[in-house]
Image (tube, coloured by chain):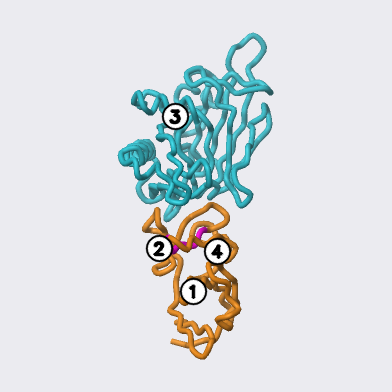
């Protein structure tokens, strides 16, 4: 497990998604209040960029902009299809930095 | 897609069957039927530049697809091939009351009637899903396009023969709970779903078919 710094916390807009490159991986970061969630920036349906999608703050979901599949921020599981899961990664916020635990 | 068409029987045994639009052949493809690596459907339709009319359902001209820009009308035109690329939610208004999301490409070719004949034919061809490839029956909010409900069918694993049962199950499940039709985003109450086959319609589903 590697702990990798992705960006500063204050670079993330609340209630929005942002794409960051961490090594060879493209990740979608979502800030929801004081928490940040990280997942692969690729929809498991057809590869749409999830960081270009909309965030439902109320429901805690990230929505693919291509075909509107909805994913739980916490688990990465599709709201409508349990077989469809986007990999998620643990996030820590330390000293104003967003750090991601990568396998 | 369509990289190879194979058949199990010797060619000389079926050579008379290669006229796909012969009425005795059309009747075999009135729903869908696997042929080699592809699945064919042939439907009798009145086809003009103005409209495509199903003799039982009325106008089925409203072909729609969903992409990043939202819902797009993709009208099927006589003698024009249209391909719905794999993964694209699509539906035809009044024809089937759900969004079909198929891993495979689907090809449509409307063939207008010959002079003096009432009906032409709509050809629908898709590659047969294999392995982990499958499809979903899905519903989206009419107002804000939030995905409401989805039933996935593992066509590649469970076989195309279960497709219509899966379709009916999806429609029944979606219709069985009003919560499924209530959009969690905007609160819009969406209409019921319905199957492709009109014989499966309940009175409520028949009413839904008339409006969307």
Residue B86 image point, x, y percent:
55, 49
Disc 2 to disc 4, C-alpha distance: 13 Å
Of the image marks 2 and 4, the number of the one nearer the N terminus: 4
Q: Which residue is mark 4?
A: A50
Query: For the residue carrying disc 2, how many other residues have a C-alpha within 10 Å: few (<14), some (14-19), or many (20+)?
Result: many
Of the image marks 4 and 1, the number of the one nearer the N terminus: 1
Considering every residue shown, the one lying at the far top of the view is B116
- Name the main secondary structure of what is drawn in magenta: strand
Query: For the residue carrying disc 3, how many other residues have a C-alpha within 10 Å: few (<14), some (14-19), or many (20+)?
Result: some
| Drawn side of residue B113 relative to residue B156, left or right | right
Q: What subunit carries mark 1?
A: A
Q: Which residue is mark 2?
A: A77
**Span of residues in magenta:** A59-63
Residue at image x 67%, y 26%?
A: B78
Q: Which residue is mark 1?
A: A38
Residue A3 image point, x, y percent:
48, 88
Q: What subunit carries mark 4?
A: A
Chain B display color? cyan
């Amino acid at each position: 497990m590697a702990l990798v710094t992705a960006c500063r916390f204050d670079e993330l807009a609340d209630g929005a998604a942002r794409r960051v490159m961490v090594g060879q991986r493209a990740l979608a970061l979502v800030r929801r209040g004081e928490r940040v969630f990280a997942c692969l920036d690729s929809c498991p349906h057809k590869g749409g960029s999830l960081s270009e999608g909309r965030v439902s703050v109320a429901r805690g979901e990230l929505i693919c902009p291509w075909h509107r599949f909805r994913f739980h921020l916490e688990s990465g599981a599709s709201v409508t299809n349990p077989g469809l899961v986007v990999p998620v990664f643990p996030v820590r916020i330390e000293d104003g930095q967003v750090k991601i635990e990568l396998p | 897609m369509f990289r190879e068409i194979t058949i199990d029987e010797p060619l000389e045994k079926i050579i008379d069957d290669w006229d796909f639009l012969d009425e005795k052949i059309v009747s075999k493809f009135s729903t869908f039927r696997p042929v080699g690596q592809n699945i064919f459907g042939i439907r009798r339709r009145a086809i003009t530049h103005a409209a495509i009319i199903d003799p039982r359902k009325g106008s089925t001209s409203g072909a729609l697809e969903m992409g990043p820009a939202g819902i797009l009308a993709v009208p099927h035109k006589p003698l024009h091939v249209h391909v719905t690329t794999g993964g694209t939610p699509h539906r035809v208004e009044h024809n089937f009351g759900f969004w079909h999301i198929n891993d495979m490409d689907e090809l449509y070719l409307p063939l207008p009637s010959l002079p003096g004949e009432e009906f032409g034919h709509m050809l629908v061809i898709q590659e047969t899903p294999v392995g982990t490839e499958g499809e979903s029956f899905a519903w989206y909010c009419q107002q804000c396009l939030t995905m409401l409900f989805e039933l996935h069918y593992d066509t590649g694993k469970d076989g195309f023969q279960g497709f219509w049962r899966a379709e009916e199950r999806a429609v029944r499940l979606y219709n069985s709970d009003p919560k499924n039709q209530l959009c969690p985003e905007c609160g819009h109450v969406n209409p019921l779903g319905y199957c492709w086959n009109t014989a499966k319609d309940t009175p409520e589903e028949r009413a839904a078919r008339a409006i969307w």
